[in-house]
Structures are given as structure tokens and as C-alpha cells.
Amino acid sequence: MEGVDESTIFETPLLELDLGLESGATVYAKAEWFNLYDAPYGGGSIKSRIAKGMLDGAEKRGELGPTTTLIEPSSGNTGSEIARLAANRGYDVEIVMPDNASGGKMGAVRDAGAEIHLVDADRGYDAVIERCEELVAADPGRYFRPNQYENPDNPGTHEQTTAPEIYQSTDQQVTQFVAGVGTGGTITGTGRGLHERSDGRVTVVGFEPDSPLHAIDGLKYLRSGDHYHPATYDESVLDRKEYVSTQAAYDRARELRERYADRTVAIADTGQHDTATVREQLRVDGQFLLGTSAAAGAQAVTQLDATGALDDDDVVVFVLCDRGDKYADIPLWEEYL
Ligand SMILES: Cc1ncc(COP(=O)(O)O)c(C=O)c1O
């Protein structure tokens, strides 16, 4: 297994993006693929943060021994990031995945040397979680499950890292924070941290897919019906919620690709990286290609603007959870990559 450099996690760059908003509000985007940017399979994602946070927390509490195997159900980024970091620290790792998970994400898990348990995707994501629970129940002494849907270190890591980074790199000027809901860890933790720091001046906007049959990776449809509500998602932190369609998100991503085809992406803050590294890692094959939930974030900001919720002195921050190269085999970018 090729080692990964954990020191590149956190302090990600902040980009200034032109989304063509009516209001003229300033829009910044936190580029999360710079976490573990030089790891194999297109770098990391926002989930590198919580993989590190949950592993550090478990180690600190003495929950991991030398023979512990880490196990997590995941269709994507959390699985690959836990696999990479746990393997890096010398633990055995097993990831339970639906058999339709994207090739890039499965490749990253495999590349880390993790054992993969595949579950028929037609049986739904609950079957993936059940398989994981069965494996743990059969040999409980062997396994530690970080459990991103229940682990307080998930929102806790965002409260301690993502929130202060955004507050500092916008010179305390942020007025809206916009993020999608999967486990709810990002919106809950970052929202809490920004509310605390700004004395409630920051408006926290969460967004969810508008349909259960969506193709926005990592996000959860919770709007109606009997859905499992993650313990890591505290909706009371939200000041507002938006619903985003897959089609509108993908259209927005393609529009941004066009807009930045011959235009430089403005870097507001390079974070812990140097400008040359940020420039080099911004594009895939020379193109500015967002991941699916990043595209949905751009769409959520555009929707906010369209309802008149933004003014020209607002400073909006949203999150680019990962980069388009993770989606080379899905309809968003398959014709471009
Ligand atoms: C690409 C991507 N975007 C967004 C999210 C949602 O973030 P959170 O789980 O913090 O709500 C995830 C979570 O899996 C993700 O993988």
C-alpha cells in the first residue's frame, strides 16, 4: 500500500467563484479535495476530515488495539478515507459497499488494501448496513466501527476545523454557510461553530435532494417517508433548508465548467498549500469539474439567490466536497473524462 500524508488534511483552499448571481453576493467555495490531494485515485474529500477525527478520537479513548479491524458500511468517500487512514496507521480494514459504488471510490478502498464486502445494490442501502452489523455481531471483539452516522467526532471535527477555517479565511465576513446533508455532520458541526463565532450572524442553510431517486453522491433524501435520521444531523442548527434536483445540480456543474474553460479560478486563500499546488490540483484534464454534491451546493446557492435571500454585501460559503474525477463513470462527467 502506498502511504498517505495525513498532514495535508484540513486547512483546504477557499476559491472565489462566479455563479452568475443576480444579487452580486460574493461566493466562496471550500475545495475539499485538497485533503490527501496526492493520494492515489484523485485525492481525498471532505470525508478525510472525519475519517481522521473519528480515528484520532478512538485512539485517544483507547478503543483501538493492535489487532482491531476497522469496519464501516459506505458507498463512497467515507469508506475510502477510513480505509486509507486506518491502513496507514497499521490497522486491518473491511468496508461493506453496494456493488454499484463508483469505480474510483472502490479503487481507492482496494488500493488501501482493505477487504471489500459487496452487497447487491438492488437490495438498497439498508442491506449494506445490515451486512456490516451481521459481520460485527459474528465477531464483536475483533471489530471497531467508526459509524459516521452516530459518532459525535463527525460533527465535532467540523466544529473544530471547518468552521474556524471558514471564519478566518473570510476575515470573519461570512454571512451564509451552505452545505448538503448526508450524515449531517458537515452542516451540524460547521453550522454550530459559525453560529458560536459570529454570535448568530451567519445564516446556516442545509440542502437535501428533492427526490429519493437522486444521483447526488453522499446526500440523503429525508423529506418524506420513514427514513433513518442520522444522530449526527441536528436540524435545529439550520436556519433554512433548500431542496435540489439532480438535473439542476448537473446543469449547474456543466455551466461552471464552461464558464471556467478559459478563465482563471480566483484563489481567495490557499490554505496550507502553495499557489502552484492549488493551481495544479484545481482542474482535471485542464477542466474545472465538480463532484455531484459540490454541483448541488452551487445550485443551492443559486436557488437562494433566486428567492431574493441574498444582497450584494453578502458573503456566501459553500462546500466542494470532492472533485469531478471521482465521477468519471457516471452521467455527470462520463462524456468529458
Ligand atoms: C461527496 C459528498 N458530499 C456530501 C456529503 C455529505 O456530508 P455529511 O455526511 O457531512 O452530511 C458526503 C457524505 O457522504 C459526500 O460523500
Image (tube, rainbow, N blue to C red):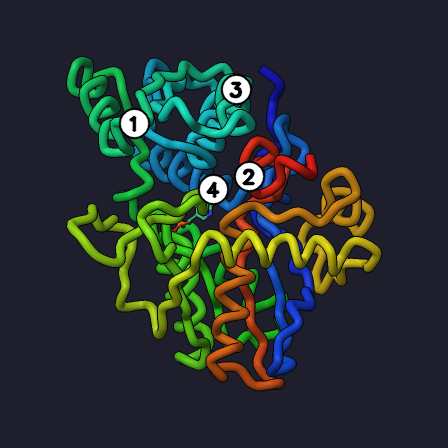
Q: Nearer the viewer, residue 31 or 70?
A: 31
| Chain-order first, disc 1 or disc 3 | 3
Q: Amino acid at mark 3?
A: Ala
Alpha carbons under labels 4 and 1: distance apart? 25 Å
Name the residue rendered at 29%, 27% in the picture: 122
Q: Amino acid at mark 1?
A: Asp
- Residue 112's disc number: 3
| Chain-order first, disc 2 or disc 4 | 4
Residue 294 x %, y %: 54, 53
Residue 177 x %, y %: 48, 68
Whether residue 130 is situated above or below residue 250 in the rendered picture: above
Residue where numbered disc 2 is placed: 331
Alpha carbons under labels 3 and 4: distance apart? 15 Å
Alpha carbons under labels 2 and 4: distance apart? 23 Å
Between disc 1 and disc 3, the foreground one is 1
Residue where numbered disc 4 is placed: 47
Q: Amino acid at mark 2?
A: Pro
Between disc 4 and disc 1, the foreground one is 1
- Label 1 neighbourhood size at 10 Å, few (<14), some (14-19), many (20+)? few
| Chain-order first, disc 2 or disc 3 | 3
SS type, badge 1: helix
SS type, badge 3: loop
- Label 2 neighbourhood size at 10 Å, few (<14), some (14-19), many (20+)? few
Alpha carbons under labels 2 and 3: distance apart? 27 Å
Q: Is residue 59 left or right of residue 268?
A: left
Residue 300 x %, y %: 48, 65
| Chain-order first, disc 4 or disc 1 | 4
Q: Quadrant of the C terminus?
A: top right
**Is label 4's Cβ within 8 Å of ligand 1?**
yes
Name the residue rendered at 68%, 33% in the picture: 38
Name the residue rendered at 34%, 23% in the picture: 96
Check contact, mark 3 vs mark 4: CB within 8 A.
no
